[in-house]
Image (tube, coloured by chain):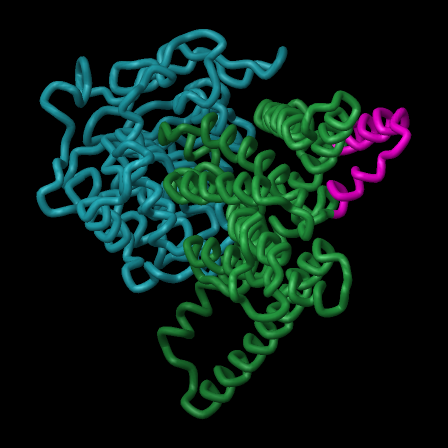
Amino acid sequence: MGYAPGAHPHPPEGTLARTDGSLLEANHVSFSYGTAEVLHDVSLTVRAGEFVALVGPNGSGKSTLLKVLLGLLRASTGTVTIFGDAPEHLTERWRLGYVPQRPELVSEIPATVEEVVSTGRLARRAWWRPIAATDRDVVRHAIASVALGELATRPIGELSGGQQQRAFIARAFASEPNLLVLDEPIAGIDRGSQTRFRDSLVHLIAEHGAGVLLVSHELSAVARDVDRVIVLKNRVIFDGPPSELTRTGVSLGVHREDLPLWLEGLG
Amino acid sequence: MLAALPLPYPFELSFMQRALLAGVAVGAFAPLIGTFLVQRRMSLIGDGIGHIAFAGVAIGVVTGVHPLWTALALSGAGALGLEYLRSRRKASGDLALALFFYSGIALGIVLLSRELEPTNIMGYLFGQILTVNVAEVATIVAVATSVVVGTLTVRRTLFAVVADEEWARVAGLPVGPMNTLVAATTAVTVVASMRAVGILLVAGLMVLPVASAQLLARSFRGTLIWASTIGVASVVVGLAASRLWDVAPGGMIVLVAAGTFATVTVASSTRARAHGKAERAAASIDGPDPATAILADSHSADRLARDGE
């Protein structure tokens, strides 16, 4: 991503993806909690420079799929590869940026935005090594890229929900990832924050060729920028450009309430 | 026995100086590890491990092995067992704690019921800092130094893991080793502190200074510094007060830490009220600052959104 002057924006030649530029691939993935099948034969791909939105109604298996893709849960059948490796064998974890839905972090102990974002650098270096000047530069740029520069030394608990979410996005940016996975990042945040959030993602994709997988049921802020929409309802029921969705009468950008309603009746 | 240093009353006597040295070491490192426990919302784990240590002390008394080592072995195993249950979600945090808590104390009571003179157990339960010998002081200081150096070296990674474990796992941070480190360090802290404040009060010294520190600090680094400073100050003031009024030092040290928390709470809420009043006065004179108004709007919008979820 090259937030720091002189930082290496991309991984060494040939390591970005082993085959066709795909960063993340799920092939015929199924997953069950006990006897209840939550995911059935799910296949999807996220390629370099691509902005993919994964949408679906509540209970459609979005969160479970995300956990399987990230290696937090193991698929019952099927395979997942990130940068060509199974998630559990992925060694360069920094290449995968992750923004959780409800970070547990806002809690008892005060921590500044800078301290939280700095933890994003830990995956890039041996964890016992002290933070170097380059790391500080990258952290500063990551904070600036989500427009929180002036709040860098403020305790994160004092920030609004939208500002906090941006801080967690900056934490993911700090490892200069090739693939960014975001879980419901715009749920319940103010419009100004949504716009800044959109700008940060577009910058990440355009300038650094990263792939983005955004899990959300509200796409209005990024509707015009999404390359592909995947609709999940325990299985993939749609995978294509947003224009195809609009043809079915769904507007991703104008009527925010339309999408979830439409999804409920789909499949 | 070392000669007394020329310190003023109440630390002019050599036993008070040994107590001061051991106490300052404990006061510095117990809240340091306590900060990570509070962040993980496991403030009472020190208490649970203290009860397991009690069983360890009892085993030592019965078998003739030095109770420090048996307490360390048992509380170490207990801490790792608790961490196993927590991480595998085999039992909820407080249920797992209750299981170890009561098993530990029950085992200790059963074992000691066979002893004819279990009086020396009181020193472990309530602390006997005034009777620590040079070897014990050296052990406590060595443990304290290792814990402080170790914790500070990996503080960023430890913070990342205890603050947001799922994210840390995805980021490839050493979640398992860090969790084991926190559990093992907690056991070591409890055992090393039990001569100073006693098994029943160890958790107080680990957590109460952190409770004050989180009200005073505005960063994680600041919280660590404040917590250790308040821990050390509580020991010094508590020891001095115990000499002055001839009361139990362990209890006095923890009471000072609790009193500090009460004072800091009152002071910070008074300051917050005064700050709010000044802001309201400024707003009524100048009218709302546009930037503040926008910020306030987004705050309330977010709060509404969060409340509505």
Along the line of sight, which residue is nearer the eye, A87 or B194?
A: B194
Part of the protein shown in magenta: B101-126
> Looking at the image, is B161 positioned above or below residue A66?
below
Residue A259 at x, y percent in the picture: 44, 38
Q: Is residue A192 left or right of residue B178?
A: left
Residue A169 at x, y percent in the picture: 34, 45
Q: How many marks?
A: 0
| Residue B108: in magenta span | yes
Residue B210 visible in the shown view: no
List the single residue furthest toward the bottom.
Answer: B285
Which chain is depicted green? B
What residue is at 32 percent from the left and 46 percent from the top? Answer: A118
Along the line of sight, which residue is nearer the eye, A114 or A127?
A: A127
Residue B122: quadrant of the picture: top right
Q: Is residue B172 left or right of residue B136?
A: left
Residue B11 at x, y percent in the picture: 60, 64
What residue is at 63 percent from the left and 54 percent from the top? Answer: B15
Q: Is residue B168 left or right of residue A264?
A: left
What residue is at 18 percent from the left and 14 percent from the top? Answer: A18
Along the line of sight, which residue is nearer the eye, B15 or B30?
A: B15
Residue B58 at x, y percent in the picture: 77, 29
Residue A96 visible in the shown view: yes
Tell me the chief SS of the magenta region: helix
What residue is at 14 percent from the left and 31 percent from the top? Answer: A10
Which chain is depicted cyan? A
| Residue B166: in magenta span | no
